Image (cartoon, rainbow, N blue to C red):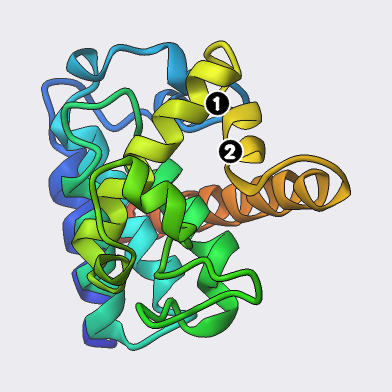
Amino acid sequence: MPKKIIYILCMLLLTACENAPFNKTEIQSNTSMGSETSQLDSESISLIQRKKQQVIIELAFARKTTPQRARYLAGICYDKTIGTVFMPFDLAEIALAETGGHRLSARAVSSVGAVGVWQLMPYRAKSHGFEPEEMKDDEKCAEAAVLELYTKLEMAQGDMDRAKKYYCGQGPQANAYIKKIRLIRREMLADFNQQVNKIALADTGTMIR
């Protein structure tokens, strides 16, 4: 079995060993579409739950960039959402929507001047206390993206999907953007369910022996 698959299975197996048995329905509800996740206080969501998302994010990022960078960026999605109302999936979805087609490059610059993995416009970066050039630093870019998403969440009156739409802007382009976000989310949830099934099969094989 490839080392990458072994790593993912081990991580998911370890994070599944909380006080209760691994509940696939619970995970799916916590990461489902809509504003349900955004209504949850960050303190009520376990770090274990966030770790589960980190593993799946790494898998999704690895399709767009190198395994090393995928792991690094997935870690950022985990770290920068701790203590916020956001989950790692929220930050990952935006990264994939913004620069997934550019290998999640820190040096990605859009035609209108947005910079970094999370594509902050220079004036928006400054509004959050960063210099535009700092958006090429993945960690600072992620921090600015979290602050930007907070402002959009306030505009959207707590509706997470609408906040992500506003992250892009308004009009037809923003409508297409939120459709892309939802597709990315479905793909990550499909990855999650696939890994859960692999764990279940591995457990079954162990019991048969």
Q: Which residue is mark 2?
A: 164
> Which amino acid is tagged 1?
Met
Residue 184: give its label.
none
Badge 2 density bin: few <14, some 14–19, many ≥20, Cα 10 Å: many
Classify the position of the C terminus by image quarter: bottom left
Q: Which residue is rendered at x = 17% and y = 15% of the image?
A: 43
Query: x%, y% of residue 145?
Result: 37, 47
Q: Which residue is rendered at x = 49% and y = 49% of the image?
A: 193
Is disc 2 placed on a helix, strand or loop? helix
Q: Is residue 21 above or below residue 123?
A: above
Q: Is residue 166 left or right of residue 193?
A: right
Residue 116, quarter of the rendered image: bottom left
Q: Please indicate, yes or no, whether residue 9 appears anywhere in the rendered image.
A: no
Query: x%, y% of residue 35?
Result: 56, 19
Name the foreground residue: 67 vs 16: 67
Marks 2/1 in contact by CB < 8 Å: the verdict is: yes
Q: Is residue 98 above or below residue 169?
A: below
Is disc 1 placed on a helix, strand or loop? helix
Numbered disc total: 2
Q: Which residue is rendered at x = 17% and y = 43% of the image?
A: 15
Name the foreground residue: 80 vs 132: 132
Q: Is residue 193 left or right of residue 21?
A: right
> Which amino acid is tagged 2?
Lys
Q: Which residue is mark 1?
A: 160
Looking at the image, which residue sits at the far right? 172
Q: Please indicate, yes or no, whether residue 37 appears anywhere in the rendered image.
A: yes
